[in-house]
Amino acid sequence: EIVLTQSPDFQSVTPKEKVTITCRASQSIGSSLHWYQQKPDQSPKLLIKFASQSISGVPSRFSGSGSGTDFTLTINSPEAEDAATYYCHQTSSLRRTFGQGTKVEIK
Amino acid sequence: EVQLVESEGGLVQPGGSLRVSCVASGFIFRTYWMTWIRQAPGKGLEWVANIKQDGSETYYEDSVKGRFTISRDNAKNSLYLQMNSLRPEDTAVYYCARLAYGDYVDYWGQGTLVTVSS
């Protein structure tokens, strides 16, 4: 099983700061890493596919980078509506796995 | 517009069975892999199972293998998850989701809560 470890578990930022979430895979997964946002009592929403590819309709302040085992989700100038839990997800192996989630608070 | 609508879940006793379903609309259902993903209360996301377009291939998370069965009826645009020998740790919101060409989840249903308790 490929284990995805996100850090930090919780991040509190002001709108002037940048949100940076990392996701580390237990073995190389190429670029088969995707990011999701989940707000309370809602289904997850796709933010970034294949590590860095943007999704239509997702604000440009969301970006992703990385390959192999280390990946990063960045939210530049976060807005109040970005308060949510963020998950990374790998599709490199048939047994799919998710990171444990990172909760983001916007002060 | 892509829509995935799960059936109502429910309360089941340990050792019991339940089938949840998902009706798809807004896309050509028979051309997509589909998946079930679950989320225990207050916890993270956990992949459960995948099924190929024609149902000929299925894959399961180890803890549900042999107890859960994913299936589909393309004529009815429907996805199913038959859950047997349910355990308290299977308590979760179960999401039906579509796998885009490229194998990532691009659309999610609203989820249905399955509670396993005596």
Image (cartoon, rainbow, N blue to C red):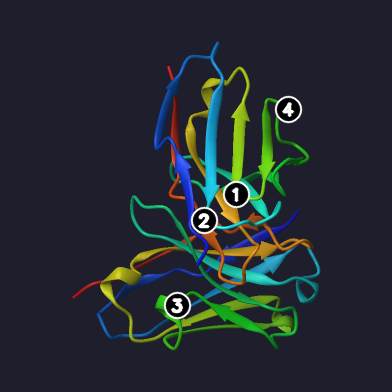
| Residue at 36% across, 59% down | B40
Distance (Cα) linking label 2 and label 3:
18 Å
Front label number (4 vs 1)? 1
Look at the numbered discs 1 and 2 and tell me whether their residues touch, using CB distance below 8 Å. Answer: yes
Tell us which disc is closer to us: 3 or 4. Answer: 3
Amino acid at the residue labelled 1? Thr
Name the residue beneath numbered marker 1. A69
Q: Is residue B76 above or below residue A55?
A: below
Instruction: Name the residue: 70% across, 29% down.
Output: A59
Q: Of tags 2 and 3, which is closer to the observer?
A: 2
Q: Which residue is mark 4?
A: A60
Q: Residues within 10 Å of mark 1 (few under 14, many from 20)?
A: some
Residue B70, x across and y down, in percent = 56, 81
Residue B35, located in which quarter of the rendered image? bottom right
Q: Residue A26, labelled with which disc?
A: 2
Q: Chain of mark 1?
A: A
- Discs 2, 3 touching: Cβ within 8 Å: no
Q: Position of residue A97 (x, y in %)?
A: 52, 61
Q: CA distance from mark 3 to mark 4?
A: 38 Å
